[in-house]
Amino acid sequence: MDQSDLILQTAAERAAAQQLPYQGALTPPEAHYLAQHLPGAVLVDVRSAAEWQFVGVVPGALRIELRSFPGMQVNAQFVEQLQAAVDKQAVLLLMCRSGVRSHEAATQARAAGYTRVYNVLEGFEGDKDEHEHRGQLTGWKAHGLPWVQG
């Protein structure tokens, strides 16, 4: 069993333990590894365009808003935009700020017929620290994974 298979197995075990409606839950380093090494893996950032612009982005990630700023209105075309950009057989890695919106996106993607759906736990910025700041404790940025300012 190679590293990708081990990561996917661990992610599936997390999903089963939490009774998630999709295939798995990944840590940011696991998602980064899969995005780099697993053919057909697609990292999709579902944060708002404002977050991409002002907080930063992962190079190479596909960007499809689940909710839009201001007001965080639902993007009614989310599933249609996802279907236009990503094959349903792809390994879909969904990421948001902290893992909450990406859970919602993963649930929608699974309901839309995607068969290999994974939520990126912790998201891009992760939890707030004792000073109410994100990006230091958990998340893509805190793990030191590649990102650029928007």
Image: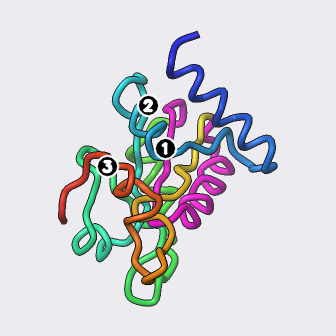
Above or below, 68 relative to 70: above
Residue 115 location (% of width, % of height)? 63, 35
Please report whichever mark, 3 or 2, sits nearer to the chain's N-terminal start. Answer: 2
Amino acid at dot 1? Leu
Specify the quadrant that holds the N terminus.
top right
Going by the image, does 142 lie left or right of 3?
A: left
Front tag of 1 and 2: 2
Residue named by callout 1: 93
Question: Quadrant of the rendered structure where residue 40 is?
Answer: top left
Kindly check if marks 1 and 2 are in contact, taking CB atoms under 8 A apart as contact: yes
Amino acid at dot 3? Gly
Residue 149 location (% of width, % of height)? 18, 63
Nearest the eye: 63 or 124: 124
Nearest the eye: 97 or 113: 97
Q: CA distance from mark 1 to mark 3?
A: 18 Å
Magenta segment boundaries in residue numbering: 88-115
* Marking on residue 75: none
Tell me the residue at 69%/35% (across/down).
Answer: 12
Kindly check if marks 3 and 2 are in contact, taking CB atoms under 8 A apart as contact: no
Residue found at the very far front of the displayed protein: 130
Callout 2: helix, strand or loop? helix
Tell me the residue at 62%/62% (across/down).
Answer: 104
Residue named by callout 2: 34
Please report whichever mark, 1 or 2, sits nearer to the chain's N-terminal start. Answer: 2
Residue 125 location (% of width, % of height)? 41, 65
